[in-house]
Image (cartoon, grey):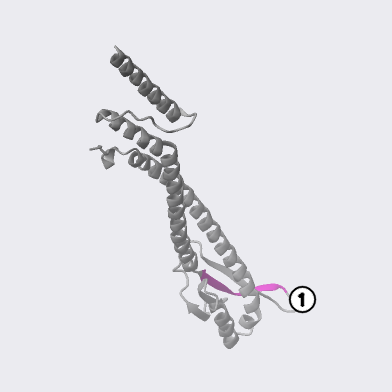
């Protein structure tokens, strides 16, 4: 009965034990670097948005704060609250008295809260500081997008890894597994005392050299046996 190598000793298994860790060793750092760069860029974009929002909101609030029009201030803040990236905002007069507020201000990630003075200039008079506005953004959307991206990238890496390993196994089988199986079958034929069998395999690589040498050895042994029978 022909012997089959144990799974642990299989060339294919050893190949997988080397190939999979190497593939992961290459894929994981690349994916982590890509994710770090994407998150860094998203954070920079969020901080740039905070600066833009502060300037725009301060300009829109200027006349309302000058006139102490709290109803209009609330309307402006309400429109700002429609932005999912805005966690909260506070408007104060020159004496730090609160004129309007929504959400939580100051409790978000570092660097996502900013403050800017509200300036007003009447006709040709001097520019006055009449209050300030403080806005806090949230990085919840950035984190949610990051989680979605990580899951998608993990699935993509897994799919690519499976495809690469499957392709490598097929190539390994066609270039090494199949000829070695035929060679092992011929060796077992001889070992069991049956008629010697040549291995039908044509290639000009190392496997071809081994099989050609085996076939030559089989021919040589046949010649020796033939000579012994004649004598």
What residue is at 45 percent from the left and 53 percent from the top?
157
What residue is at 61 percent from the left and 74 percent from the top?
57
Label 1 secondary element: loop
Question: Does residue 71 lie above or below 167 as drawn?
Answer: below
Question: Does residue 192 lie above or below 156 as drawn?
Answer: above
| Residue 99 appears left or right of 181 | right
In the rendered image, which quarter contains the N terminus?
A: top left
Question: Does residue 118 lie above or below 17 as drawn?
Answer: below
Q: Nearer the viewer, residue 59 or 127?
A: 59
> Residue 32: x percent and y percent?
46, 51
| Residue 83 appears left or right of 174 | right
> Residue 205: x percent and y percent?
48, 29
Q: Nearer the viewer, residue 1 or 36?
A: 1
Residue 122 position by quadrant: bottom right
Q: Nearer the viewer, residue 13 or 53?
A: 13
What residue is at 51 percent from the left and 52 percent from the top?
34
What residue is at 45 percent from the left and 59 percent from the top?
150
The residue singled out by tag 1 in the image is 124
> Residue 19: x percent and y percent?
40, 42
Residue 159 position by quadrant: bottom left
Numbered range of the magenta stretch: 126-136
């Amino acid at each position: 009965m022909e012997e089959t190598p144990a799974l642990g000793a299989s060339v294919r298994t050893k190949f997988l034990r080397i190939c999979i860790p190497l593939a992961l060793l290459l894929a994981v750092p690349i994916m982590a670097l890509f994710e770090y760069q994407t998150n860094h860029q998203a954070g920079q974009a969020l901080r740039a948005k905070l600066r833009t929002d502060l300037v725009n909101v301060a300009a829109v609030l200027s006349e309302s704060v000058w006139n102490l029009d709290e109803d209009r201030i609330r309307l402006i803040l309400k429109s700002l609250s429609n932005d999912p990236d805005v966690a909260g905002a506070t408007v104060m007069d020159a004496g730090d008295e609160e004129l309007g507020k929504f959400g939580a201000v100051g409790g978000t990630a570092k660097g996502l809260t900013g403050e800017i003075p509200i300036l007003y200039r009447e006709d040709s008079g001097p520019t006055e500081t009449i209050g300030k506005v403080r806005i806090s953004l949230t990085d919840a959307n950035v984190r949610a997008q990051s989680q979605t991206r990580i899951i998608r990238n993990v699935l993509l890496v897994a799919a690519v890894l499976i495809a690469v390993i499957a392709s490598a196994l097929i190539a390994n089988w066609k270039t090494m597994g199949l000829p070695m199986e035929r060679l092992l079958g011929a060796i077992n034929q001889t070992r069991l005392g049956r008629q010697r069998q040549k291995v039908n395999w044509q290639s000009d690589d190392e496997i071809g050299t081994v099989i050609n040498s085996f076939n030559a050895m089989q021919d040589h042994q046949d010649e020796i046996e033939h000579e012994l029978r004649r004598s």
